[in-house]
Amino acid sequence: MKEYRLELIKIGETYIKFDFDFNETNQELIKKAYLEQIGFSSFEFFKNRESLKISIEYDEGSLKTRIIVWGTAIYMGLANYGSFRAGVRELVNDVKDFSEYVIEHIDDDPNISNKNIIRTEKRTGLPGRIQDIYNRIDKLEKNINNLTNNQIQQEIQLIKQEVANLYTVLPFQERDVFLNELSNNFKQNLPNPNDSRTDYLANRYGLKPDEDVEFINN
């Protein structure tokens, strides 16, 4: 099994596509708008805000901006929410509220109009992928009487595969907590993690120690 040393976990991401050209001037414009119109008040959406960091990253094309919330470990962001599962649900909701606030206020800047915003997304990071597992389990249990035994077993195996994948990329201190929230049907005799899937999860939702990111709240 591969091991992933992720320094930070992506808790959530606000995606905004502007119709601006991709250049340093416009990048600074967006950063300035975030700091002045939203600023660190956005941390108020999170209970354990002292463990969080924020970065702003840009992709080419029409200026695609990603305002990313990072946490040193998922549970550090859940410590004030209760159980791990309840914490994941609340954290996903908090991330959506954070994104909503950013999207609503970024164009309060006099140099940005809502007409400059082409597309927005509220992305829920690694907690969102864990919540997907809980949702699949709930759906299976709700509909179990309408499924054949083969359909039930097939869905259980698919869920167990993703549990194994997520377990592999979670910080060490989160792994047992994550499994303990699952019933035996979904955590015993887990298959080997899928390397291509775990590589994707680690690259999409993690920050490795050798990667350089500028945090705006440092």
Image: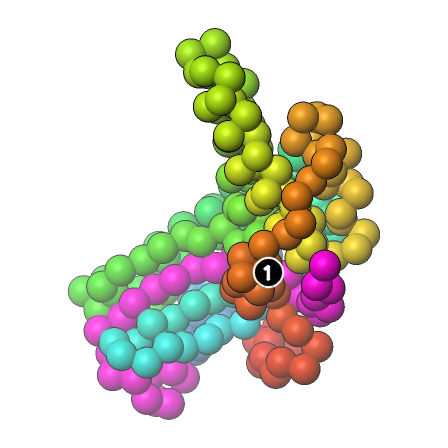
Q: Is residue 94 visible?
A: no
**Residue 88, position as x, y percentages in the image:** 62, 41
Looking at the image, residue 25 sits to the left or right of residue 202; the answer is: left
Around disc 1, counting alpha carbons within 10 Å, would you say few (fewer than 14), some (14 to 19), or many (20 or more)? Answer: few
Asked if the stretch drawn in magenta spans residue 154, the answer is no
| 65 relative to 161, above or below | below
| 187 relative to 216, above or below | above
Q: Nearer the viewer, residue 32 or 70?
A: 70
**Residue 100, position as x, y percentages in the image:** 40, 50
Looking at the image, residue 204 sits to the left or right of residue 210; the answer is: left
Residue at label 1? Answer: 195
In magenta, the rendered stretch is 1-28
Location of the N terminus (image quadrant): bottom right
**Residue 42, position as x, y percentages in the image:** 53, 57
Q: Nearer the viewer, residue 9 or 97?
A: 9
Q: Nearer the viewer, residue 150 or 212?
A: 150
